[in-house]
Every structure is written in structure tokens, then in C-alpha cells.
Amino acid sequence: MSRVDPGYLPRGNPCAQCGEPISAPDWIETGPGRASYLWTCRACDYRFEAIAFFDQAEPDRQAALAA
């Protein structure tokens, strides 16, 4: 699992089943150009995964900081 900047974590994502907001994902897995988030709703106990795909043309934040 890659390191994730906590300032960029999704927050308040609505549950895919009941719509209640979920404060933060339970698990985050990142790879080149994508991030997978595992969410668990405490209101209805539904679990689901959301995947975000990022534009590969965007500069890598870690590389920019290291330069």
C-alpha cells in the first residue's frame, strides 16, 4: 500500500445503499493512476469499494517534492 496524504482523503462519502455519510474509508490501496477505497456504513452495515482513476499526465506529487 502506498503512502496517502491525509489531507487528500475522501470524507463524508454517502453510503451506496442508504445514503448516510461515512466519515472516512476503512482501507485505502493506491497504485499508479488509481486509488481504491473500502467503505463500511455504520448505519446499515453495508460495505462497498470505490475506485478513483487519476490522469497519468498530472505530475507526481512525491517526485515534485523530492526534486
Image (tube, rainbow, N blue to C red):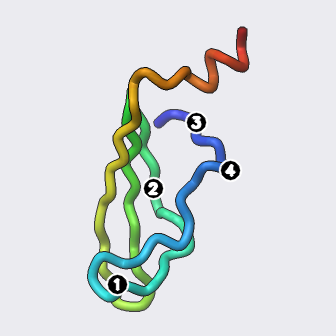
Q: Earlier in the sequence, mark 4 or mark 2?
A: 4
Q: Nearer the viewer, mark 4 or mark 2?
A: 4
Mark 4–mark 3 distance (CA, rounded to whole Å): 12 Å
Q: Nearer the viewer, mark 4 or mark 1?
A: 4
Mark 4–mark 1 distance (CA, rounded to whole Å): 26 Å
Please determine whether, in this image, residue 31 is positioned above or below residue 47.
above
Q: Nearer the viewer, mark 4 or mark 3?
A: 4
Residue at screen point 63% across, 23% down:
62
Amino acid at circle 4: Gly
Crowdedness of circle 1 by 10 Å Cα count: few (<14), some, many (20+)? few
Crowdedness of circle 3 by 10 Å Cα count: few (<14), some, many (20+)? few
Mark 3–mark 2 distance (CA, rounded to whole Å): 12 Å
The residue singled out by tag 3 in the image is 3
The residue singled out by tag 4 in the image is 7
Q: Earlier in the sequence, mark 1 or mark 3?
A: 3
Q: Nearer the viewer, residue 57 or 29?
A: 57
Mark 1–mark 2 distance (CA, rounded to whole Å): 15 Å
Element class at badge 1: loop
Q: Which mark is residue 27?
A: 2
Residue 20 rendering spot, x and y as whole percentages: 43, 86
Q: Earlier in the sequence, mark 1 or mark 2?
A: 2
The residue singled out by tag 1 in the image is 45
Element class at badge 3: loop
Quadrant of the drawing holding the C terminus: top right
Amino acid at circle 1: Asp
Residue at screen point 61% across, 49% down:
8
